[in-house]
Amino acid sequence: MEQKKLELSNKIILLTGATGYIGTVLSYEILRSGAKLIITSRNEKNLLKFVSSLKPKYKTRCKTIVADLSQDNQIETLVQKIKKKYKFINGIVNNAYSGKTGPVEQINKRDFQNAANLNLYAPLKIIKDLKNLMIKGANKSKNSSSVVNIGSMYGSVSPDKKIYKSFKDQNPVHYGSTKAGLIQMTKYLACNLDSNKIRINCVSPGPIPKNTNSSKLLKNLSKKTPMGRIGKPIEVALPVIFLLSNYSSYINGINLPIDGGWTAW
């Protein structure tokens, strides 16, 4: 059997939530793997800042679209812009997310609806509306197109209150609940959405905190993790690239924990 390279040359990939802590690393690594990349964020300033930091050879392969994916009309605008410019795409990474912090008692209906819109409905609508472009991409490349949803370990387990002394650091109830829904939606779509042309998988990052001033929190997170340390964004990006690549051509409907063994307890 001919060995396939773990690279994305000649593929067109859409990445949402492209300018966040993990999103920035995903953007760079997907470009570095040879793909043409469509990146979207609600923050135009952050998009422009990211593109300006790229090497010239990457800038030519990077298209930016400003969109707040919690708003239906902006999802529709994003989809229409992609359909107008591209005849096909080969992959989607749904990385945009929402989850206002706070204890259960402070979470209201609007907070929960916002999280559901961004963490669940937006990925579903984007996948549905770009389905035909992904099928065209599969036909052109003679390999299935690929969707990677970014879940969370808290879609499978609850936060440990002994670790998070402050709700400022803790992922809230509507974040975990909607990420659990995203994991299940991944499985459903993998079985029911042209699975011979489009593969749909999920990765669930574990403790990969951004900047925190709490050395105690970092110590607690590391101690809870069987591997004894927190993770790095690159450790999420590379498995995502694997799932986007032809090398994962028979992987469909999985949720891949990237959590140092956290959910194995």
Image (tube, rainbow, N blue to C red):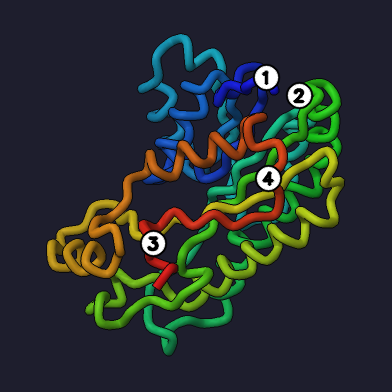
Q: Tell me the distance, in whole angstroms, between the alpha carbons under discs 3 and 4.
A: 21 Å
Disc 2 residue type? Tyr
Q: Is residue 225 visible?
A: yes
Residue 227: % across, % down? 28, 58
For disc 2, the marked residue is: 86
Query: Which of the marked residues, 3 or 2, is nearer the chain's N terminus?
Result: 2
Q: Nearer the viewer, mark 3 or mark 1?
A: 1
* Quadrant in which the N terminus appears: top right
Q: Secondary structure at mark 1?
A: loop
Q: Are marks 2 and 4 in contact (CB under 8 Å)?
A: no
Query: Which of the marked residues, 2 or 4, is nearer the chain's N terminus?
Result: 2
Quadrant of the rendered structure where residue 260 is?
bottom left
For disc 3, the marked residue is: 261
Judge whether 218 appears above or below 46 on screen: below
Left or right of 51 in this view: 155? right
Q: Secondary structure at mark 2?
A: loop
Query: Which of the marked residues, 1 or 4, is nearer the chain's N terminus?
Result: 1
Q: Secondary structure at mark 3?
A: loop
Q: Are marks 3 and 2 in contact (CB under 8 Å)?
A: no
- Structural crowding at the residue carrying mark 2, measured as other residues with C-alpha within 10 Å and reported as few (<14), some (14–19) or many (≥20): few
For disc 4, the marked residue is: 251
Say which of 50 and 30 sits in front. Answer: 30
Q: Nearer the viewer, mark 3 or mark 2?
A: 3
Say which of 216 and 96 sits in front. Answer: 216
Quadrant of the rendered structure where residue 220 is?
bottom left
Q: What numbered label is drawn on residue 2?
A: 1
Judge whether 252 appears above or below 30 on screen: below
Q: Tell me the distance, in whole angstroms, between the alpha carbons under discs 3 and 2.
A: 40 Å
